[in-house]
Amino acid sequence: MRETNRSESVQGLDLAVDLAPNNPHHLWLSNPVMIASGTFGYDGYGRGITEDMDLGELGAVVPKTFTRLPREGNPEPQWFPKSYREAWDTGDHLFLNAIGLTNPGIEAAMRDVTPGWDQWNATCILSFSSDTVAQFGEMAAMAAQGTGYRAIELNLSCPNVEDGSLFGHSPASTAQAVAAVRANTDLPVLAKLAPNVPNIVEIARAAIDSGADALTICNTVPAMRIDTQTRQPVLGNITGGLSGEGLRPISLNLVYQVSDALDVPIIGVGGIFSGEHAAEYILAGASAVQIGSANLVGLSAPWRILAELQDWMKHSGVTNLRGLTQRARRRRSHLVNN
């Protein structure tokens, strides 16, 4: 587990960000580029990451989401296209997945998985999800005793079995889930919000008022495609989540809305394939970004995107990323242009 020095800079650029400024533990990252949950290596837990990929050079890593009990996941196929790399090379930049949160369960994770994260020299963030409020609290209590990570990200896009809706689809259920976690841990908490909601600002406010330190915006958008040859949906689960370039304008809009309404740290995620894409999110009011589908095109994407963001800052005359985010948030009718 990496302890980040907030004064770290690269080539005279100050990229450090604090994602939990009101939490006694804080969550300082050396830079805003993070790996999104579910896309860390080929299995979501780092398989394929090589020694020359220094995770300590990135802001943070969010390995794949854990649930209270083990999950097998959805039927195959779980990805479309099957190879993101081949699809990217042929110009298809819209991706679908329906993994189903395949994982060993948080109890096994605390015992066998997360302790090894200390070896990565990285700031790691534990992601978990649940289908009841009580389990959210139970998992937070377990996480409070674990090692290998410095914060928790709540995946709120799981069904609440108590009323059939997704936790992240209403302010009330969002508040209940976050409050249950907050009551059982003092670690920084990031709430990952769903995009397909009537009023994301209300849900974001409910998460913050209930104890979240920051917001991750957003999860994938429900979507599907049909193979015209087989006349069947391309995913075994029929529907899945849309990611890739099609998600970026949707997520950017949500980041913009929330940053206009709330003065809280926001992590923007969705369709980031270049440093300029990352800069778009910063200009919309995000403090940090998560790289998702780009990792599945090439595992070295986060390091390339970080280098491109640094180049963009130098060419744009920006030396302090936090200052840029603050200026972006002061606008109300237009995005900042410097």
Image (spheres, rainbow, N blue to C red):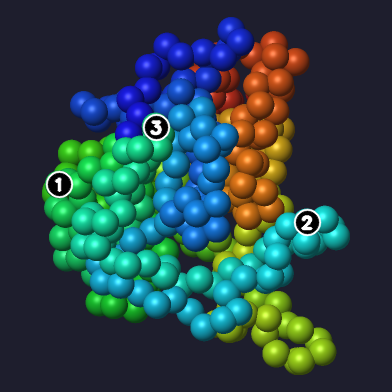
Residue 42, x across and y down, in percent: 55, 58
Q: In the rendered image, which residue does mark 3 sit on? A: 121
Query: Could you tell me how far apart the alpha carbons at marks 3 and 2 are, in whole angstroms?
Result: 31 Å
Mark 3 and mark 2 lie on one chain; the one further toward the N terminus is: 2
Q: Badges 2 and 1: C-beta atoms under 8 Å apart? A: no
In-front residue for pair 66/47 = 47
Q: Secondary structure at mark 2?
A: helix
* Residue 94 seen by the camera: yes
What amino acid type should be assigned to the residue bearing mark 1? Gln
- Whether residue 159 sits left or right of residue 58 in the image: it is left
Badge 2: residue crowd in 10 Å (few <14, some 14–19, many ≥20): some
> From where the camera sits, is residue 286 visible?
no
Neighbor class of circle 1 (other Cα within 10 Å; few <14, some 14-19, many 20+) is few
Task: Name the quadrant containing residue 139.
Answer: bottom left
Identify the residue position indicated by label 2 in the image: 88
Residue drawn at x 34%, y 43% is: 117
Q: Residue furthest top?
A: 12
Q: Where does residue 270 sit, x and y in percent of width and height?
A: 60, 50
Q: Which mark is residue 76?
A: none
Kind of residue at disc 2: Trp
Q: Residue furthest front?
A: 51
Tell me if mark 3 has few (under 14), some (14-19) or many (20+) residues whose alpha carbon lies within 10 angstroms of its own: some
Residue that label 1 marks: 145
**Which secondary structure lies at badge 1?**
loop
**Percent coordinates x, y for residue 149 in the rendering:** 30, 41
